[in-house]
Amino acid sequence: MSFKAKLESYRGKSIDQICPNLFHDYNSNHCAHFVSHALNLKFSYHCREFKGGKKRPANIRVHEIFAKCPRVGKFSHAPSDRPVLAFVTRKNVVDLENKSIRNIPQKHVGIHLNGSIYHYSNSQERVVRWTTKKFLETFQNIYSGDQGLFFGTVPGSDIRLSIDSSGQNVQRGIPFELTRTGKKWFAQATAAQNNERFYVGRNVVQPSKKFYGIYQKTNEYYGEKFDAQDYIHSIDHWAYLLHVTGYCESKNFFNLINSYDRAKFTFGFYQLAAHTPKDNLILLFRESMKLARAKDYFPELTLRDGELHRIDQDGSYTNLETIVNTGRKGNGQLQLFMDYMNPKRKTIEKQEVLQAARLIHWMTNDSGFRDLYVRVSNSILQRKMSNRYNQWYNLHGHSDVICALVADIHHHGRAKKSMVRSALNSSNPKERLITINPDYGGRNQSLRAIVNSLESDGALGRKTYDAAINEFR
């Protein structure tokens, strides 16, 4: 369905026919509510937080949507090649430079497309389509003061890339040709020194498990592997703890990717995920921007004030580290970064394939990037061992084996703290930790195999954790 057809399908519908949650009050203003459902704007404050429900949420506040727009301005300056948001309110409450609208009652928003504005008429209690002239004139007559008409580009539209899958018309960075054979995706860096065609991953669509994206089967893993012995000189004994979890996550292959679960994108032997603020994959991207080849692989990214930004087509910037409250437990997630890596959760698109291809090619052809990945992963592990795991369980004096098992459990997220405490207090903590969750039989089997192997080699089982210095002695 085209976007115009989608907007037309909303015409005449009341809010109870649009919102799948519980915010259907006809005495409330639903202009932002409708716009957000139509455009999938689910950042806080949204209908599910306000009234409840379990379905996809939508923001309900005009001024919050305005603040999220990548670009804003007078409507006369609006781009004509795409849908934009149309805002009408008193001129003196709008600050274009700071992208803010004062939160007054008299403000309204709709979606402009091809000369028409689709919006929710609160007086008629349904979606209508008006001309731009009628939209401004109507609210000029209804609202007090002098009204202005302003535009905003759609929140999130700035993180969509224009993908040339042939690789022939790419102006910046390494061009990649993307091809699909059956379910499998392949890529070729057509202008790079290493321009051999390589495997990216295969499509997976499993609605019962909520899996939509690309991944690599275990028997398809390939490329460089992390080996603790290669990094003992730089990160000391922590290399073996990384090796344990890396083996369970990826068999320690550096270029492993998946984009099928709720994190939307996960990469590398330690499987750093995109959804967590100030943690995991975003930390790798921050540091990678300092590498010489960063602009070859991600020319549209840069650091500003220490945070990752997308450089938009018009030269403006979008902070990909903005934390979005999605209603899940925790501190929100990096929705813009997730969407930059993988735009749509249930649709497999060329942008997520391109991002995977970029990372795989970079990891394969740059030892500096592999070394950086290890440093970032090690930093995450050390920080969590000191600031979380030791705080939770008082691990001082415990063996490196026990510490490795605790770290793997929480990296994977397969057990609660109470279960780990119970295992640590048992007569056989190693065995209890390995088998802590029987629902993950394959993981437990891999964990047992790699720990026993490293113990047999003398790499693990001879040192204990010193919490004061956060090291093993």
Image (cartoon, rainbow, N blue to C red):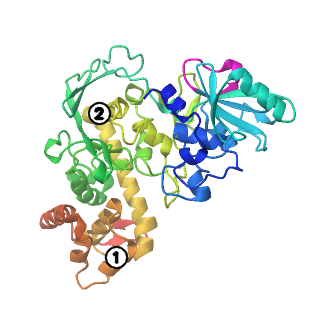
Find residue 352 and report its image quarter: top left
The numbered mark, 2 or 1, whose residue comes first in the sequence reads 2
Query: Looking at the picture, how far across and down is residue 174, in whole percent?
Result: 35, 22
Of marks 2 and 1, the one in the foreground = 1
Q: Is 72 inside the magenta-drawn segment?
A: yes
Q: In percent of the image, x 36 and y 49: which residue is there? A: 272
Left or right relative to 50: residue 350: left
Mark seen at residue 366: 2
Is residue 426 shown in magenta?
no
Tag 1: Cα neighbours inside 10 Å, few (<14), some, or many (≥20)?
some
How many labels, in total?
2
Q: Left of 172 or right of it: where is 400?
A: left
Q: Is the residue under label 1 in contact with that under label 2 (CB below 8 Å)?
A: no
Q: Residue furthest right?
A: 145
What is the spatial separation of the Cα atoms under label 2 and label 1, in whole angstroms?
A: 41 Å
Based on the displayed image, in which of its 4 quarters is residue 461 positioned? bottom left
- Residue 359, given in percent of the width and then of the height, sits at 32, 35
Q: Nearer the viewer, residue 165 or 319?
A: 165
The amino acid type, in three-letter code, at marker 1 is Met
Q: Which residue is mark 1?
A: 419
Q: Which residues are magenta?
A: 71-83
